[in-house]
């Protein structure tokens, strides 16, 4: 075995091991990165096998070329999408005024906000304090391991931090982002706000803004813009930004 092949085997093994660790140790919060590392290990191993096959076979060389083309056709769009997701997520539009706010729910641990939801709430609190005269829809139902709905958790946290409960509208049925926007739209219209024409600020995590805008546009939100909430740890940001590129593809195709 050539030195380059040995090095490729070692790199693939290290990537696979690191991926398995991230996938199994949930406390890391980087399961997707674990799957991605395992996938990279598989690609490296496949490339090594194809190189060996191609060394003595015309069919092997053809298969290697097809593999390389397929990999390029997959990677180039994903890199472009990832760049778009990062660019949109890093654009802070919190200085823009809005006619209403929609705060997208995230996980609740019992009755307490998860890290993702906590960061959304702190970003929402700042925006609501800067814009004291507009209503806010708190959207999110009750999921596994949650003792109360995400909307109720947000209501309790915001009112405890000084926000007038009279301006908070609870939407407690949504189970995903598409439903968040669909059900919130009905509540906004009851308040005399037309999401197709009025400005709606959407509070969510920065990595989630690009996909949220795509879904909002499909729900006929004509002027929705994101208020980014950032996670405190860089490794989590990296994990979720990587995952979001694949989620955007899923949304384009299926949602």
Image: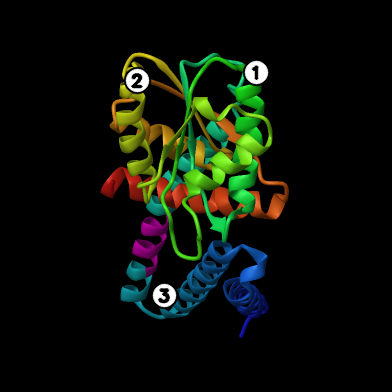
Left or right: where does residue 144 sit relative to residue 187? right
Q: Is residue 40 above or below residue 87?
A: below
Residue 44, horizontal then vertical, whole percent:
53, 71
Q: Alpha-carbon neighbours of circle 1 within 10 Å: few (<14), some, or many (≥20)?
A: few
Q: Alpha-carbon neighbours of circle 2 within 10 Å: few (<14), some, or many (≥20)?
A: some
Using the image, tell me which numbered label, if any, was put on residue 222.
2
Magenta segment, principal secondary structure?
helix
Give the mark nearest the N terminus, 1 or 3. 3
The answer for how far apart the CA atoms under marks 1 and 2 are is: 23 Å
**Mark 1 falls on what kind of element?**
helix
Q: Residue at x 59, y 17 (%)?
A: 131
Residue 167, horizontal then vertical, whole percent:
51, 25
Decide if residue 79 is in sight here: no
The magenta segment: 64-72
The answer for how far apart the CA atoms under marks 1 and 3 are is: 64 Å
Q: Nearer the viewer, mark 1 or mark 3?
A: 1
**Residue 255 is inside the magenta segment:** no
Residue underneath mark 1? 130
- Please identify the residue farthest to the right as the structure is shown: 233
**Mark 3 falls on what kind of element?**
helix
């Amino acid at each position: 075995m050539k030195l380059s092949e040995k090095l490729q085997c070692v790199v693939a093994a290290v990537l696979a091991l690191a991926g398995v660790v991230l996938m199994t140790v949930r406390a890391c919060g980087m399961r997707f990165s674990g799957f991605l590392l395992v996938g990279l290990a598989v690609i490296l191993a496949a490339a090594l096998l194809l190189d060996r096959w191609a060394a003595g076979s015309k069919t092997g060389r053809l298969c290697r070329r097809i593999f390389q083309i397929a990999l390029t056709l997959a990677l180039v769009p994903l890199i472009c999408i990832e760049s778009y997701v990062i660019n949109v997520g890093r654009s802070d539009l919190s200085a823009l005024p809005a006619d209403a706010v929609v705060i997208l729910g995230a996980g609740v641990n019992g009755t307490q906000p998860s890290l993702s939801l906590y960061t959304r709430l702190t970003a929402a609190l700042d925006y609501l304090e800067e814009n004291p005269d507009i209503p806010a829809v708190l959207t999110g139902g009750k999921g596994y391991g949650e003792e109360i709905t995400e909307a109720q958790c947000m209501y309790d946290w915001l009112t405890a931090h000084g926000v007038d409960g009279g301006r908070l509208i609870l939407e407690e049925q949504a189970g995903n982002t598409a439903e968040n926007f669909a059900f919130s739209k009905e509540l906004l219209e009851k308040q005399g706000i037309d999401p197709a024409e009025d400005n709606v600020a959407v509070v969510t995590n920065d990595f989630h803004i690009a996909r949220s805008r795509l879904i909002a546009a499909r729900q006929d939100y004509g002027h929705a813009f994101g208020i980014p909430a950032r996670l405190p740890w860089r490794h989590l940001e990296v994990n979720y930004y990587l995952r979001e590129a694949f989620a955007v593809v899923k949304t384009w195709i299926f949602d």
